[in-house]
Image (tube, rainbow, N blue to C red):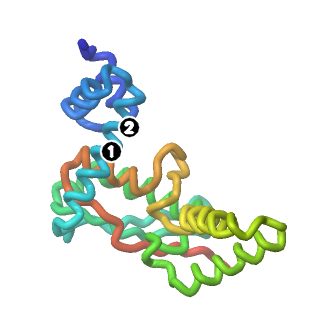
Amino acid sequence: MEITAKQVKELRDKTNVGLMECKKALAEANGNVDEAVKVLRKKGIAKAEKKASRDSSEGIIHAYIHPGAKLGVLLELSCETDFVARTDDFKEMANQIAMHIAATNPMALSEEDIDPKIIEDEKEIYKEQALAAGKPEKIVDKIVEGRIKKYYTENCLLDQPLVMDEDITIKELISNAVLKLGENISIKRFARYQIGM
């Protein structure tokens, strides 16, 4: 199948990934732009996992202050080289993530960062709620599992859908940047400050 420049441009506009990667993804998806987006996402996650073991000792501390100066976020976003840390793409991603943190107030970076005691307490509450609602005992565990998954999505930064584009999670946003910039990128830590909180 012939891949046109128009298709490549459309995919590049949607994903911000390099031209050659877009062309390869379109070839793999038989010219279907939506399928090519999925191909790039999968490749991004795979590449991000491969690069995750590489040292990411460079990066930036990004500060975002919400209009009105009553809410702010500090974010440490790391990468492998100072060169990538100074790119507009990297800085723009740091700002997107910081604005997202300001909007959603995540409890933790990932599932592993939430105290297991909190999860056990939540499971107990969900189980009691399901039983009180008259749900059959054989499906209560599945209900609890679903609610815990939702709890992680609401409270763990990496699992949250990006506020500006709910079709991708923060983890996928970072994976796409790894694919585009060619380096391991990770969020080291963040802090959200709010007047009166």
Q: CA distance from mark 2 to mark 1?
A: 6 Å
Judging from the image, what secondary structure is the residue with disc 2 in?
A: helix
Q: Which x, y percent locates residue 60?
A: 29, 65
Residue 182 versus residue 141 in the image, above or below:
above
Name the disc covering residue 103, or none.
none
Name the disc covering residue 38, or none.
2
Whether label 2 touches label 1, CB < 8 Å: yes
Q: Quadrant of the N terminus?
A: top left
| Residue in view at x 52 percent, y 53 percent | 161
| Residue in view at x 45 percent, y 53 percent | 96
* Nearer to the camera, 195 or 15: 15
Quickly name the residue at label 1: 42
Q: Which x, y percent locates residue 43?
A: 28, 44
* Nearer to the camera, 141 or 195: 141
Determine crowd level at label 1: few under 14, some 14-19, many 20+ residues with C-alpha closer than 10 A: some
135 horizontally vs 122: left or right: right
| Residue in view at x 51 percent, y 63 percent | 101
Q: Which x, y percent locates residue 168?
A: 47, 47
Kindly tell me whether residue 102 is visible in this rendering. no
Determine crowd level at label 2: few under 14, some 14-19, many 20+ residues with C-alpha closer than 10 A: few
**Quadrant of res 23:** top left
Q: Quadrant of the C terminus?
A: bottom right
**Quadrant of res 141:** bottom right
Q: Amino acid at mark 2?
A: Lys
Judging from the image, what secondary structure is the residue with disc 1 in?
A: helix
7 horizontally vs 53: left or right: right
Kindly tell me whether residue 25 is visible in this rendering. yes
Q: Amino acid at mark 1?
A: Lys
